[in-house]
Each structure stands twice: as C-alpha cells, then as structure tokens.
Image: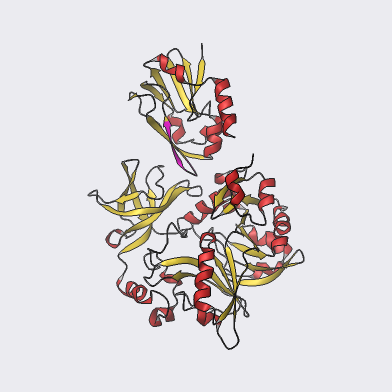
Amino acid sequence: MTTVKYTEEHEWIRIENGVGTVGITDYAQEQLGDVVFVEVPEVGRTIAKGEAVAVVESVKAASDIYTPVSGEVVAANSALADAPGDVNLEPTGKGWFFMVRLADPSELDGLMDQAKYDAFVKSLA
Amino acid sequence: MADPASDSLKRTPLHALHVALGAKLVPFAGYDMPVQFPMGILNEHLHTRRAAGLFDVSHMGQIRLTAKPGKNAAAAVERLVPGDIAGLQPGQMRYTQLTNAAGGILDDLMVTSTGDHLLLVVNAACKDADLAHIRQHLSDDVEIEPMFARGLLALQGPDAADVLGRQAPQVRAMTFMTGSFVMIDGVECYVTRSGYTGCDGYEISTPAEAAERIARLLLADDRVKPIGLGARDSLRLEAGLCLYGHDIDTATTPVEAGLVWSIGKERRAKGGFPGDEIIIRQIASGAPRRRVGLRPEGRTIAREGTEIIDAAGAVVGKVTSGGFGPSLNGPLAMGYVDRAQAASGTKLALRVRGKPVTAEIVPMPFVKHTYWRG
C-alpha cells in the first residue's frame, strides 16, 4: 500500500515497503520559481527527522529541504544535476530528491495527509 | 485577496497592465512591482537575449534640470558627479555617480543632454534623497523638476530596434548612449538607446497617461514579452553592471567598483566633485580592493554576502551579487576582493553553506555586450 504525507515546509513523502521517496510539492515549486540547481544527500547517510539534507536553488533563492522522517538514504536523484527543471515540471514525479529507509514509521503520524495539506495550502493564499 | 501591506505601496502607470498580464508582484523600493510574469524568470531572461523584452522601470526617478538665466546646468551637475557632463553634446547620454566627500557613491545615474535641459534617471530607492541632495546643492543654478509620475519603459534585446523602428523609424539610426524626442502613437516621448541588460535596446520616457497604451502597442508585436525584475537582475548581472545598494554604495568608491571609465579625463586632472581627492589618488595609485567577476565551479550558487576566501582560508572579500546566469547556463557572482587577489585567473573559494566552492576571477561582462554603436 502506498501512503503520501506532507510537511508544513511543503515536502511530500511517498512510502512504499518501508522506504519513503521525498520531494517538494507543486505549491513549493511554484513559489520557488525556476529551479536551477539541486543538491541531494549522499546514499548511505543517516538522517534525522527535520534535518536539512538537500538544497534547492531557484533563480530567486536557495531553500533547504528537510527530511520528514529519520532513516538511511538509500537513493538520490542524480538526474537532477543535469535536469533541475524536472522539479518544476514534475515535482511529484521525475523531480523527486531522495529515498529514505524509515527508522521509525510512527514519525509519519505527525505529518499531514492530502486533504489536510490541501487545506493548509488554501489557508496560505 | 488583497495583501494589506501592499496598500501602502506605490504603483507605476503600468500596474493594472502587470496585473492583467498575470504578474507576480512584490514590494520593491516602495513600489508594487512585477518580479516575474507567467513565462518565468529563466525564460524571460532568455527571451530578452533572443528577441525583445519590455520592462517597466517607471519606478526609477526622472529629474529634469534647466539652467537658470546666466547659469550653466552641466557645470553645476559636475559639482556633484565625477563624469564629464560639460562635454555632453545635445542628444548624448552618460553614466555617472553622485559621490560623497569620502568618495563613496550616493547613487549611480544616467545624464542626457537635450540641448535645453539635462535629464537624469536615478535609482528608485534613492530618488527622494537624490532630489533633496540636488536641491540642496544646485538650486541657485538650475530649475529642478522631478518627473516621478512619468512612465519609463525599457525595450531590450536584438529585436528591439525593429520593434520600436516600426512605430518610430528614426530610432533605428540612433546609436548607443544617445537620446532623442520621438513621437510614438501620436505622443511625444524621450527615447534613449540604452538599458541595463547588456543587449541593444531603448528606454522610453512617456507621459504617465500614455505609458500603458505604448506598452500595449509594443507588446502587440509577437517578438515582445513582458519581463519582470527577476530577469532584469540576472540580465544586468551577466552584463557585469552594478546594482546600487548591493555592488556599489556609500562605502565603495567608483575606483574600487571598476567605474574609472566613467570618470572624465579632465575631471581626473582637475577634480571639483565630492571625494575628488581620494578618487583621484585611487586612480593614480590603486584602490585597496576591487570589484571582480567570479565564476564558481560546478553549479552551486554563491549569493550576496557569501565570503570569498583564499587558499589559506583567510577571508579576502565578499560577494555583492550572485546568482544563476541563464545565458551562461551556470552560476556567476561579483564581489570585492583585496587588490592583491584581484587579477583575472586568480583561483579563490566561496564559502557556501559552510563548504568552500572553487571560483575563478574572470573579466566582466560575463556575457558580451551587444550595444549598437552604428
């Protein structure tokens, strides 16, 4: 079963078989503008929930990406080095940042589901 | 929903047009200004370099100076700037700076002679202070007329000459850094062949009430797209042009900033402007630090405020403007470094998020200027 959760910092995490894929939401990429550089974490690195583990640079500003959960980085999207614009084009698809093997699945409980996130974004308008 | 903070912001004559075109508006120098249009900063930048972009720069300050009877306006202005203003022929335009007693820069500006008047274009954030400064020092010699309500449009890019030439054929023959009164759609405008992108192009000063009509007329040409402040910044950065308040300010001299080319030959010999002693001394014996261009390796972007460090890890300067250059397809920066480190080819490092990124000092502009000099 696939679960997708969201953070207030506009990251999404899609969990399949204990591994979460992390990226930024469509709202986030829209706010950032054209993405020109992405720094992803190294595979094998152990990361803690809330830690700044990636950086996304748009034409306007640099933004930290915080991991929504703790665990070990098992994959990073190296294709973004040559195609950072994928974050704008497909933020929840080809524009993913990294995959993390969850250390503590209960950390997901504090995150928002789709309906809550949609309401959250609406409240920002 | 209306942002309550935006209520206090001033609007240019093109504000309604920006909204109609779907601009993302941000506060800038007290104005509600478009940072980008739906096309996005990257494509707006590339479009300007490839075709033509239309910028609203009406927030900048236009000031008209007219000599009082028996007085000389150019000679008066020269008391405030190091540029050669007395030597301006009618229709000629020059870039210069308002300096202070320490040789620092109060603002940078364009001065154009129409023959009867001098037209100044100063930065939006400085215009009230500049006006007060000019009034304080030049009121005995010149009539000072702020024209802050007028429109100012910049049409920039390789297609600019043909686009504007279809409305006013005489602009085709104008050369870089000249100005002329031109009728556009039945309205008298003042057009200069100048800009802030490194491209060929024009700045068009219009009566306030005609600004939107002329903007729409230019936008009706398929080659022209509206461009926001975001791309204006990346274009000027690639062109190696200074942004006031960032790359130059009251703590930098024109010599440190690499603007000696804008100081008249005679002015260097005779002085007669604020800070002349220190500026002339720096021209002769060098400034302690210099503005340089930097190309970081890889794609990491070093933004304003980034420390510049040498091989030993010592801080030798700071980035004053930095970003991504869409035409370069990579990061670029400008900043100040100690004179000993300022030679082109010098390898330094930029400390980005705690990590050093190698960067090389390179000559500016980063992207070749394509001004039309006839």
Q: Residue at x 42, y 80 (%)?
A: B272
Residue B247 percent coordinates (x, y): 42, 58
Q: Is residue A10 visible?
A: yes
In the displayed structure, does residue A96 sit left or right of residue B192? left
User: Outermost residue toward the left?
Assistant: B312
Rendering quarter of residue B67: bottom right
In magenta segment, residue B161: no
Q: Position of residue B178 (x, y in %)?
A: 59, 71
- Colouring scheme, one of rainbow, by chain, secondary structure, one colour: secondary structure
- Helix, strand or loop for the magenta stretch, by majority: strand
**Closer to the camera in the image, B33 or A101:** B33
- Residue B66 lies, in percent from the top left, at 60, 79
**Which residue is pictured at 35% across the width and 28% down the height?**
A42
Q: Position of residue B185 (x, y in %)?
A: 76, 63
Question: In this orientation, which residue lies closer to the viewer: B105 or B170?
Answer: B105
Q: Which quadrant of the figure contains the C terminus of chain B?
A: bottom right
Q: Where is residue B292, by image quadrant?
A: bottom left
Residue projecting furthest to the right: B186
Please say whether residue B87 is visible from this viewpoint.
no
Location of the N terminus of chain B (image quadrant): top right
Q: Is residue A62 magenta?
A: yes
Q: Which residues are magenta?
A: A58-65
Q: In the figure, is residue B281 to the left or right of B86?
A: left
Residue at 36%, 65% in the rendered image? B256
Q: Does residue B54 lie above or below B103 as drawn? A: above
